[in-house]
Amino acid sequence: MSQSHKTGDEDSLGAIGVDVAKRLASPLIMLAAMWVIRIADFVIPIRFNGAGLRSWDFSHWYGIFTMPFLHSSWPHLLANSLPFLVLGGLVVADGVVRFWAVTGIVMVTSAVGTFFVNEPGTLTVGASGLVFGYFGYLAVAAFFARTWSGRIARGIISLLVIGIYGSAMLFGVLPRLGHISWQAHLFGLLGGVFAAWFVLAWAGRRKSQRPRAGTSGTSGGKTVDTGDPELDAILRNLD
C-alpha cells in the first residue's frame, strides 16, 4: 500500500472516529448529568428528588424536564444507566438533531402521561421513560425508513433491540403495584413510536417535498434554500 493511500485511510478513520465521538457526546452528557446529580444528592443534605414530577401539581411543571435526571437510589440509577447508554447510542447514530428531537418528544409525552394518569401528589423520578421511548423508536423505525437499504438496516437493529429488551419492556408497561412508574414507561414507549413517525416519516417527507428549481444549461436541479441557515442544517440532517 502506498503512503498516500495509507494516509487517506487514516484520515477517513480519523474522521469517522471524530463523528462517532460527536454523536455519542449527547447521551454521554445526559448520563453524566444524572450521575453528578445523584452524587450531589448523596453528599449534600438536600433532597433533589423533590424537584421531580408531582402528578396533578401544576406548580411542578418543571418536573417534565427534571424527572429523567433524578433517581431515587443508586440501584435505580444503575438499572437505567446501561440501557440508556446503549439505546441512546443507537438513536444518536441517526444524527444528533434526531437524537434531541426524539429525546424531547419522549421526555414530554412520558411526563405528561404520568402527570395526568398517576394519582395526585405522586412523585416520579428516573430516566426509564426515556429508555422505553428510545426502545419504542428503535423498534418501529424500520417501518418509516424511506429506502429498502434503510429498512433492512433498521429492521436488523429493531430485531436485536426487541430480542434483548423486549420482554423487560413489555413487563414494564403493565399496570402493577409497587414503586415502579408503569405510566412513565408506557407513555415513554408511545412517545418513542410517535417520534419515529414524526422524525423519520413526516419530517423526511417534508424534506423530500421541498421545491426544486432547475438550473439553466444543466440537466439536473438544485434544492431551493429556505433562507434560514439553522432550518437548512436541520433538514439536511434529516435526510
Image (cartoon, rainbow, N blue to C red):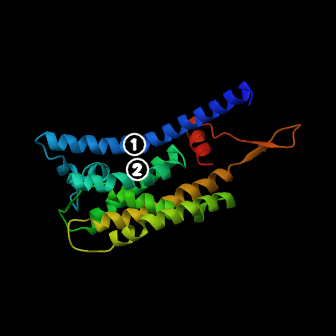
In the image as oriented, which residue stretches furthest toward the left? 45
Residue 45 at x, y percent in the picture? 10, 41
Q: Residue at x 14, y 40 (%)?
A: 43
| 44 lies above or below 166 | above
Residue 52 at x, y percent in the picture? 23, 52
**Sequence-wise, which precedes: disc 1 or disc 2?**
1
Q: Residues within 10 Å of mark 2 (few under 14, many from 20)?
A: some
Q: Secondary structure at mark 1?
A: helix
Relative to 238, 55 lies left or right: left
| Disc 1/disc 2 C-alpha distance (Å) | 7 Å
Q: Amino acid at mark 1?
A: Leu
- Contact, CB < 8 Å: mark 1 with mark 2? yes
Relative to 1, 139 lies left or right: left
In the image as oriented, which residue stretches furthest toward the front? 1
Q: Nearer the viewer, residue 57 or 2?
A: 2
Q: Quadrant of residue 230?
A: top right
Does the rendering let one see residue 194? no
In the image as oriented, which residue stretches furthest toward the right? 217
Q: Quadrant of residue 164?
A: bottom left
The total of numbered circles placed on residues is 2
Q: Residue at x 79, y 43 (%)?
A: 221
Q: Quadrant of residue 27?
A: top left
Q: Amino acid at mark 2?
A: Leu
Q: Disc number at residue 28?
A: 1
Q: Which residue is mark 2?
A: 85
Relative to 135, 173 lies left or right: left
Q: Residue at x 59, y 33 (%)?
A: 15
